[in-house]
């Protein structure tokens, strides 16, 4: 039985890396079979194995982002940024990168990439800039922004639910180091753009009503509710779902039309990974590793080890699966006396490691597909790593110092 579960576990990760289009189905299937093999399963204990708070956060935020996108909010923001740059390409690119970072902290980072990459490609066309490097850097800032809050990307949502740390604590501990890493990454990103002195003329291409931006107000209340969720006595999943339902109530479209953009691939993938992890924990797959690390549970270097292990694994296994693997180990190490800052090490590791290769996160894959659609070519593995290696290594070093100084 153990061998069979291990085989399904390995196959699941193989599909995630090599066949991501069918990975959600295979992961869910192998997860259910694995749980059935280790014990009886019912709807009651299924709810104990899958963290439905995580699922509700994802569904709620996906609906909110979808409705805001339908109303043109994100395109309005993008147009305002171009206007703010006053036609200067260098200024516009800096503003776009900064906006991608900030928006990705609170929104689905895939959405920010879908909105901003076409604009960056347009800027590259009229300026002669290397569109591959400019868009690769946009993807980097999206991943970095996503790692700075509890709702920035699926790995952080999973970490939040597992750690039971507050929404504010994620911002408190991850935002400062995230900003520093992003600032250093910006220096790398702008090296080839400093001499560009072209201008973009104002045109009908950039004309948007300011009233559209008022639609961000309901979303602001959702974020505010999340910030004070402990005082309200509500889980983030409930707040996200309530916010989504309130926005849906104000729409005239049918329910089916409003939920079309829910990413069921991600929902199924996360649910399947939860089930696989439950089965693996039951058979004690990670016990030897946990026992090996147990003597170092109180060591200040453990968090640095978790950080770099997460960075390297994420580059080749993808951020979400690595998060699930590492959480199984971290929770046991914390039980043995390790510091809760291991959660911050993991969040930083998968966030920075998500920039290492073109398959390290969903944002990278989607961004590359957008480039393929517009330019009929992808950013190759080598080109991506050429752009990412220095920012990733520098980000890892900065995060290591931060974790060592963190009490």
Image (tube, rainbow, N blue to C red):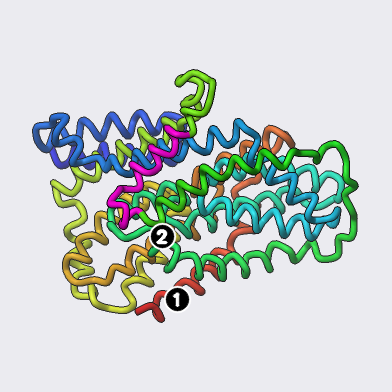
Q: Is residue 150 left or right of residue 142?
A: left
**How packed is label 2: few (under 14 Cα within 10 Å), some, or many (20 or more)?**
many
Q: How many marks?
A: 2
Q: Magenta span has 240?
A: yes
Q: Which residues are magenta?
A: 229-246
Q: Looking at the image, which is closer to me, 185 or 234?
A: 234
Quarter of the image where one finds residue 273: top left
Q: Residue sitting at 42 percent across and 46 percent down?
A: 154
**How packed is label 1: few (under 14 Cα within 10 Å), some, or many (20 or more)?**
some
Q: Looking at the image, which is closer to me, 364 or 359?
A: 364
Q: Is residue 322 above or below residue 396?
A: above
Q: Which mark is residue 347?
A: 2
Whichever of callouts 2 and 1 sits on the residue coming sooner in the sequence is: 2
Specify the quadrant that holds the C terminus: bottom left
Q: Residue sitting at 19 percent across and 70 percent down?
A: 294
Q: Is residue 208 left or right of residue 6?
A: right
Specify the quadrant that holds the N terminus: top left
Q: Residue sitting at 14 percent across and 33 percent down?
A: 44
Do we see residue 126 in this rendering?
A: yes
Q: Is residue 80 above or below residue 207?
A: below
Residue with the mark numbered 1? 402
Q: Considering the numbered disc 1 on the image, is that residue within a helix, a strand or a loop?
A: helix
Q: Looking at the image, which is closer to me, 308 or 199?
A: 199
Q: Magenta span has 143?
A: no
């Amino acid at each position: 039985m153990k061998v069979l579960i291990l085989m399904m576990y390995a196959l699941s990760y193989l599909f995630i890396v090599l066949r991501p289009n069918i990975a959600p189905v295979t992961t869910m299937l192998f997860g259910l079979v694995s749980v059935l093999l280790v014990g009886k399963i019912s709807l009651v204990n299924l709810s104990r194995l899958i963290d439905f708070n995580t699922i509700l956060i994802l569904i709620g935020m996906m609906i909110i982002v979808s409705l805001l996108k339908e109303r043109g909010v994100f395109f309005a923001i993008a147009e305002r940024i171009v206007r703010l740059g006053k036609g200067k390409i260098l200024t516009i690119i800096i503003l776009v990168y900064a906006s991608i970072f900030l928006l990705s902290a609170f929104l689905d980072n895939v959405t920010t990439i879908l909105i901003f990459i076409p604009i960056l490609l347009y800027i590259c066309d009229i300026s002669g800039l290397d569109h591959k490097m400019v868009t690769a850097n946009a993807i980097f800032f999206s991943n970095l922004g996503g790692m700075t809050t509890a709702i920035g990307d699926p790995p952080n949502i999973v970490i939040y639910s597992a750690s039971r740390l507050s929404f504010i604590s994620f911002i408190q501990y991850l935002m400062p180091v995230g900003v520093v890493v992003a600032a250093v990454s910006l220096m790398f990103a702008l090296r080839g753009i400093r001499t560009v002195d072209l201008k973009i003329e104002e045109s009908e291409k950039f004309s948007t009503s300011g009233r559209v931006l008022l639609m961000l107000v309901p979303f602001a209340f959702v974020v505010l509710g999340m910030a004070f969720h402990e005082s309200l006595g509500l889980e983030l999943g409930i707040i996200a779902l309530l916010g989504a339902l309130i926005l849906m109530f104000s729409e005239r479209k049918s329910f089916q039309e409003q939920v079309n953009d829910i990413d069921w691939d991600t929902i199924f993938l996360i649910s399947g990974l939860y089930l696989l992890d439950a089965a693996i924990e039951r058979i004690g797959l990670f016990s030897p590793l946990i026992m090996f690390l147990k003597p170092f549970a109180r060591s200040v270097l453990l968090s640095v080890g978790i950080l770099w292990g997460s960075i390297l694994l994420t580059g080749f296994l993808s951020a979400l699966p690595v998060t699930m693997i590492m959480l199984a180990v971290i929770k046991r190490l914390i039980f043995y006396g390790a510091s809760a800052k291991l959660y911050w090490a993991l969040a930083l590791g998968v966030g920075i490691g998500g920039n290492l290769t073109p398959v390290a996160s969903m944002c990278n894959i989607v961004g590359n597909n957008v480039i393929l659609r517009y330019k009929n070519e992808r950013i190759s593995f080598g080109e991506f790593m050429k752009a990412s290696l220095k920012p990733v290594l520098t980000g890892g070093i900065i995060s290591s110092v931060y974790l060592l100084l963190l009490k």
